[in-house]
Image (cartoon, rainbow, N blue to C red):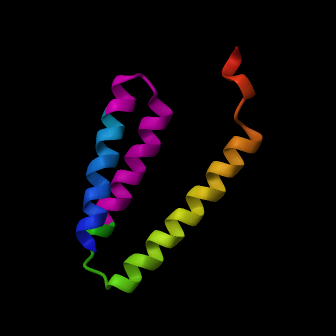
Amino acid sequence: MDRVFRMLGFWTSIFTVMFYVGDMIPAAILSLVQTVFFLTLGYLKLSERMYMYLFGAYLTVFMVGFTWYSEFILVPGFGH
């Protein structure tokens, strides 16, 4: 299970680079934070149950944050 988190860290680092190259600095910083989070968890050697609990907590926080962003911050139509 630790390899899964390291793989997630790898892919979020790819997103970090792409966001940075595309001059999307806030998204790059958010993706960098996720990369550090996943890589840190990947090297902790926790039990599979703890990894599943942490992933469930991560998904819960993501969905709450995404819903809050899309409801209160996102501008409909993206400025068209």
Q: Quadrant location of the N terminus?
A: bottom left
Residue 51 at x, y percent in the picture: 38, 77
In this figure, what is the number of numbered marks? 0
Q: Residue at x 71, y 49 (%)?
A: 68
Residue 36 at x, y percent in the picture: 34, 55
Majority SS type along the magenta span: helix
The answer to which of 64 and 41 lies nearer the viewer is 64
The answer to which of 25 and 73 lies nearer the viewer is 73
Is 2 on the left-hand or right-hand side of 38? left
Task: Determine the image quadrant of residue 52.
Answer: bottom left
Q: Quadrant location of the C terminus?
A: top right
Q: Residue at x 48, y 36 (%)?
A: 27
Please say whether residue 43 is visible from this viewpoint: no
Task: Determine the image quadrant of residue 38.
Answer: bottom left
Is 74 on the left-hand or right-hand side of 16? right
Q: Is residue 35 a member of the stretch shown in magenta?
A: yes
Residue 57 at x, y percent in the picture: 53, 70
On screen, residue 69 above or below 23: below
Q: Residue at x 46, y 27 (%)?
A: 24
Please say whether residue 29 is visible from this viewpoint: yes
Q: Going by the picture, which residue comes out furthest to the right?
A: 72
The answer to which of 78 and 33 lies nearer the viewer is 78
Which region is colored magenta? 18-40
Q: Residue at x 42, y 22 (%)?
A: 23
